[in-house]
Image (spheres, rainbow, N blue to C red):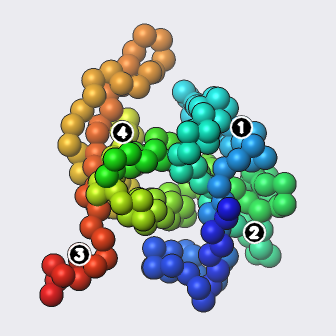
Amino acid sequence: MSQHIAPGSTPSWLAADPAAAGRPWALLALDESTLPLVAEVERSTHDHPWGEGHFRDSIAAGYWCQLLVTPALPGDPEAWAGAPRLADGRLLLAYLVAMPGYCEAHLLNITTVPLHRRQGCARLLLEALQAWSLCQGAECLWLEVRAGNLGARALYERQGFRQVGLRRGYYPMDGAQREDAVIMSLPLVPAAAETEVGA
């Protein structure tokens, strides 16, 4: 089921984003019909990509697998003409996979289509993930990120994540080399609790 987000009825996590003004967005559940497109983007974006089986297993396990999509609009950059699209013509901007757990959620994969980077897509997905996690009763969000991915680490820090650990040699690199994973977490506080704290 897709969660349609349009101007005038935007949830708070999207309304605060200036890049979203005047443009309809939607969160769409990843399924078999969109899996080939996502797998193609994954292969073209990452040196060590997930295979289709990873996404298919995540869907089967009931993980939160979401696409951020938007319709093509007049005035879109010419470069977007070759951007990944769903069968209905909507543009695929980004996607994520998150695993629910007991009182927590774990971000497993978040990817922005290269043409749509630095447009706020990953932040929109992270804020949607926070809202979904709270609805699941999660008290904390977890993720691992490559130690050398400074851009992603900075984004996570802006969203409130903090480093809490390090996994040595967690990620594969070229040859026999491995890269450390920085473990980050974000405590989640329901809106009602925030109000009580500020009262």
Task: Give the residue drawn at x 46%, y 62%.
Answer: 132
- Alpha-carbon span between mark 3 and mark 2: 37 Å
Residue 86 point in image, percent of width and height: 79, 54
Q: Quadrant of residue 181?
A: top left
Please identify, in this view, whether the residue under mark 3 or under mark 1 is nearer the observer: 3
Disc 4 element: strand
Q: Residue at x 18, y 82 (%)?
A: 196
Answer with mark 2 or mark 1, whichever residue precedes in sequence: 1
Instruction: Say which mark, if any, is on residue 144.
Output: 4
Q: Earlier in the sequence, mark 3 or mark 1?
A: 1
* Mark closer to the observer (3, 4): 3
In the rendered structure, which disc, 2 or 4, sits on the residue that comes first in sequence? 2
Residue that badge 3 annotates? 193
Query: Which residue occupies the foreground of this view, 121 or 165?
Result: 165
User: What is the distance, in whole Å, between disc 3 and disc 1 at their CAs?
Assistant: 42 Å
Numbered mark located on residue 40 in the image: 1
Spatial CA distance of label 4 from label 1 is 23 Å
Position above or below: 44 against 198: above
